[in-house]
Amino acid sequence: MREGFDFNKLLAPIVLIGLYTFFSIFGNNFFSLNSIINILDGSYFIGFMAIGVTFVIITAGIDLSLGTNMMCAALLGGFAYNSWGWPMGFSLLFAVLFAAFLGFLNGLMVAYLNLPPFIATLGMMMMGMGFGAIATNVQTMRYPTFGTPEGIFKNIFYKTVNGFPVGVLWLAGFFAIAYILLNHTRFGRYTFAIGSNKEAARLSGIKIKPWLTAVYAFCGFCSGLAGVFYAAVYTSIIPSTGNGHELLGIAGVVIGGTSMSGGSGTLAGTLIGVFIMSVLRQGLMSMGLQSHWQVFFTGAVVIGAVLLDQYRINQSNKIKSD
């Protein structure tokens, strides 16, 4: 499903350009360097989540535990740093690996226990949210800020003191790695094959269960990275939160053109979808509208993207039947 040109691939870039142009004309001081930096700042942790769940959705699955796994990882990283006295580097590594473990558990439930991805990851979403609160004794975890001895943490993962958005460089670098993984490795080929036709993939010799487990583990790893960047951006991590952030990652994937039926999708489209949501949020703010308008319009765009995907699938099936 990666071959051939599909006009659907142009829609996300057109929407992004159209939104930016609209808000540049009608928004207050939207067309500025500061606005661009704010758009990038709002894309860091969502981008990492969206990249991970793109692989899952291509397999015709879903991961509803993205947001709480991200927050749980950020909480445990902060707990290791504040309560156990671990160095910042080891604390962050622990956070990422723990989130990857949660993703691995998702994969085991989906691939080996044959639970529907919706149910398995819904349960993990609640477990992750609860475990983060239990492990930290429902205490807010705080990361170093600018001006503290370890404030370099924010310089490395968020932005420099003079405002340069370092996080976008990390996102671009990881996007390149994930792009190669999806499009030029066996892992990516099998991901597309499982999503296109799981039974055909099995008959062709692909061991579905371990590869599907690996996809969910990779998604968990991406959630852990998102947790690191969320901590760098916001510094204070509150227990029992994170529920709802997974919708931002999934929305970016759907808006970017990845089919919910599996077997088709691009990481470039996903990244554009994430930027569409960030532009929408900043643009509505520039027009004096509150955050609930952003939620409303994001939902409308997601519905439109899914309807368009369904139309494309129906047209494809009609062509095949003719």
Image: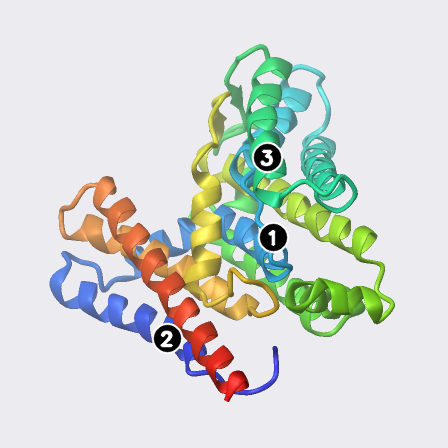
Most foreground residue, 282 or 9? 9
- Residue plotted at (48% across, 34% down): 146
Q: Can residue 302 be seen in this view?
A: yes
**Mark linked to residue 69:** 3
- Residue plotted at (73% across, 33% down): 94
Residue 133 lies, in percent from the top left, at 56, 17
Crowding at label 1, few (<14), some or many (≥20) Cα neighbours within 10 Å? many
- Say what secondary structure mark 1 lies in: loop
Most foreground residue, 117 or 103? 117
Q: Which amino acid does label 3 sit on?
A: Asn
Residue 195 lies, in percent from the top left, at 65, 63
Crowding at label 3, few (<14), some or many (≥20) Cα neighbours within 10 Å? many
- Residue plotted at (76% across, 40% down): 108
Residue 68 lies, in percent from the top left, at 54, 32
- Say what secondary structure mark 2 lies in: helix
Q: Which amino acid does label 2 sit on?
A: Leu
46 is higher (above) or lower (below) than 8? above
**Mark linked to residue 11:** 2
305 is higher (above) or lower (below) than 95? below
Q: What residue type is labelled 1?
A: Gly
Q: Circle 1 sits on which residue? A: 61
Q: Can residue 150 be seen in this view?
A: no
